[in-house]
Image (cartoon, rainbow, N blue to C red):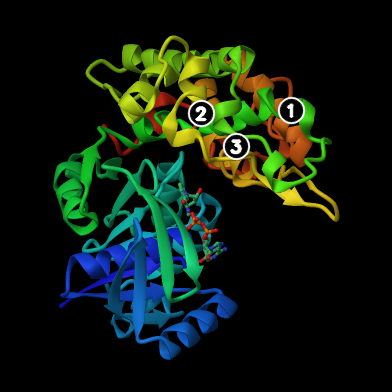
Amino acid sequence: MSWITVCGGGNGAHALIGTLLLRDKGIQIRLYLPIEEERSQFVEAISCQPSFELRVAGKVYSVASKRIHVTADPKEAARSSVIIMVMPAFAHEPILSQLAPYLTKENIIAALPARSGLEYQAWDILGRANREECTVVGFQTLPWACRIEEFGHSVIIHGTKKRVGAACLPREEIGEKARVFSTLLGMDVIPYQSMLELSLANTGQLIHPGIMYSVFGDRLEEVFPSENEVPLFYASVDEAAAKVLSRMSDEVITIKDTVEQKRSGFKMPSVVHLSRWLDEAYGEEIADTSSLARKFQTNQGYQTFKVPVKKLNAGYRVDIAARYLTEDVPFGLLVTKGIASVVGVETPMINEVITKISRWIGKEYLVGGRMIGCDVTATRAPQKYGIDSLKGLLQQEI
Ligand code: NAD
């Protein structure tokens, strides 16, 4: 019998719990839920329902809910050798801090997904607790598009990625850890060479803030009278928006090239231009590959996603509190901007996107293009951790 700790009780955590339990009858889950209300709701749900259900493509797969043991005790949570955080990046800090005193070199603590800059936060928190010897794994994305159907009881998986990239601290363990997680998740886990590669290869940090800025920036006050009239998100990319996204992506490629030139032998092959990434990620799902805009417009996988909105008394308006901004900027684009500053790369397009979005969400990140705004402390930019050199960026990676 092996135990795996899952941290988080949201959509992704439900999908992960169901997947792990279905794939291996010998697995039991320690579900670490430090938020009291969520914990008591989950305990109540599994005590009322003997099964936990995963719904995929119209089929229902059931596992016994008694295999899920809910806990609020970080010491107990750290008893499993594999611990997986499935939550937005802003929740990694409290979870890592709560678990850190109990972690040992036997633990693998993973973030599914990591977003960017996980390594700086992990070095900081685990270092202060003297727990650097445990292994940290960051995944590039959540492998499922999923939604809770009934809390603590059932989840719908709308789509599953065939493979997911991952990086590891220490870097040389990624081959072995990729095999462990491939078996647990039932999909190919592609080893990335470094956490820096994972951070820069995070395409959500470009696509989400980039589209909000270029497509919806002038539509923040617009009221969409009904749900049907809420515009599509990715498929709304026009030529002008594609130009913005392409320039942002070019800037990331310049950061990658600069790091690789400064550090011979250090390579980040997964950091590719958005246009190529779309081809590789979606392949034949894209009907027209003649331009970046057309790739967004004709990608089958993008046709159901609408711009995030909040409900008004009458109608809907673009939601600036959505994770596309509140997660992908401080735990994505700001990290990349911070890395660019450290290695001396100018990023005028990324600066403009950050500056405009900062105004919408009432944050100060950049002052005169520099990472000195008062809200940088609430991001995972290297500057938050006092990292100001390439050596610092790569401290435990080379
Ligand atoms: P969610 O909102 O459903 O889950 C949030 C969970 O995080 C909460 O239920 C809670 O358990 C935990 N949490 C939040 N703040 C916390 C705190 N301060 N302390 C302790 N726990 C806290 O999110 P999700 O849909 O499961 O998404 C998880 C991640 O996966 C996000 O980064 C999201 O952007 C990404 N993602 C999700 C999907 C999807 O289909 N759900 C798809 C792609 C990527």
Label 3 element class: helix
Q: Nearer the viewer, residue 89 or 390?
A: 89
**Left or right, 98 with reference to 223:** left
Which x, y percent locates residue 377?
63, 44
Q: Residue at x 31, y 85 (%)?
A: 66
**Which residue bears the numbered disc 1?**
217
Q: Amino acid at mark 1?
A: Gly
Label 1 element class: helix
Q: Residue at x 39, y 68 (%)?
A: 101
Q: Is mark 2 within 8 Å of ligand 1?
A: no
Q: Quadrant of residue 213?
A: top right
Q: Amino acid at mark 2?
A: Thr
Q: Please say whether residue 255 is visible from this viewpoint.
A: yes
**Which residue bears the numbered disc 2?**
336
Sequence-first tag of 3 and 1: 1
Q: Residue at x 48, y 80 (%)?
A: 42
Cβ–Cβ below 8 Å for labels 3 and 2?
Answer: no
Query: Which quadrant would the C terminus be assigned to in this image?
Result: top left
Q: Quadrant of residue 38?
A: bottom right
Q: Nearer the viewer, residue 20 or 193?
A: 20
**Which residue bears the numbered disc 3?**
329
**How many discs mark residues in the rendered view?**
3
